[in-house]
Image (spheres, grey):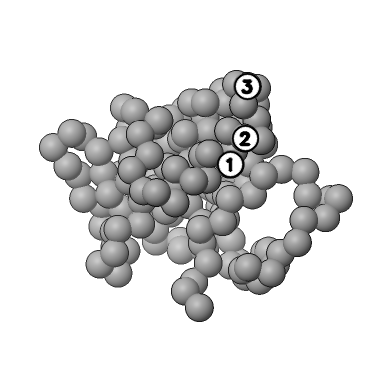
Amino acid sequence: MSIVWDERGGATVVRDGHPQSYVDPDDPLLLVFEYVQQFALVLEALRPDPAPLAVTHVGGAGMTLARWVHRVHPGSPQIVLEPDVPLTELVRRELPLPRATGSGSGRSPGRTGSPPCGTGRPTSSWWTPTTGDGCPPV
């Protein structure tokens, strides 16, 4: 697990030899990976105005989307649930979130903390958008 910095000042989070996320600390609107762009499009459709949007992120890697939400929807309360503790510690140390992002990150018990990946169905008790890229391959 590592963070690879590029000449533009951005960083790629690499885990098991595979790029997981890209973060430009100076430009949180830069979304390099297509899957993160798709999450952002969905969130924009849910809340096109800049009002705060409460978001739970299941899987966070570099917390790219949390940074984007903070910029696009200032004051948004967010939580990032990342089951990989060493990854979370690395990102906190090397790519800390800006102060006052409204985001927190915590240890998640993985599958016990949410419905099994791909089987969750929204219910009336779900009131915040939940992004999920923390599922293991099937």
Q: Residue 90 bears which disc, if any?
A: none
Mark 1 → mark 3, Cα distance in angstroms: 13 Å
Contact check, label 2 and label 3, Cβ < 8 Å: no
Residue 123 is left or right of residue 25, and the answer is right
Closest to the camera, between mark 2 and mark 3, is 2
Residue 104 is left or right of residue 25, and the answer is right
Pinpoint residue 26: horizontal percent, then vertical percent: 31, 27
| Secondary element at tag 3 | loop
Pinpoint residue 89: horizontal percent, then vertical percent: 40, 53
Estimate how packed mark 3 is, as few (under 14), some (14 to 19) or many (20 or more) residues with alpha carbons within 10 Å.
Answer: few
| Secondary element at tag 1 | helix
Residue situated furthest right in the rendering: 124
Q: Residue 49 bears which disc, if any?
A: 3
Q: Residue 42 bears which disc, if any?
A: 1
**As rendered, which of 129 and 9 lies closer to the eye?**
129
Amino acid type at mark 2 = Ala
Residue to which mark 2 is pinned: 45
| Secondary element at tag 2 | helix
Amino acid type at mark 1 = Val
* Residue 78 visible from this viewpoint: no
Mark 2 → mark 3, Cα distance in angstroms: 9 Å
Residue at 57 percent across and 26 percent down: it is 73
99 shown above or below 79: above
Residue situated furthest left in the rendering: 7
Contact check, label 1 and label 3, Cβ < 8 Å: no
Amino acid type at mark 3 = Asp
Mark 2 → mark 1, Cα distance in angstroms: 5 Å
- In terms of image quadrants, where is residue 30? top left
Contact check, label 2 and label 1, Cβ < 8 Å: yes
Estimate how packed mark 1 is, as few (under 14), some (14 to 19) or many (20 or more) residues with alpha carbons within 10 Å.
Answer: few
Residue situated furthest bottom in the rendering: 138
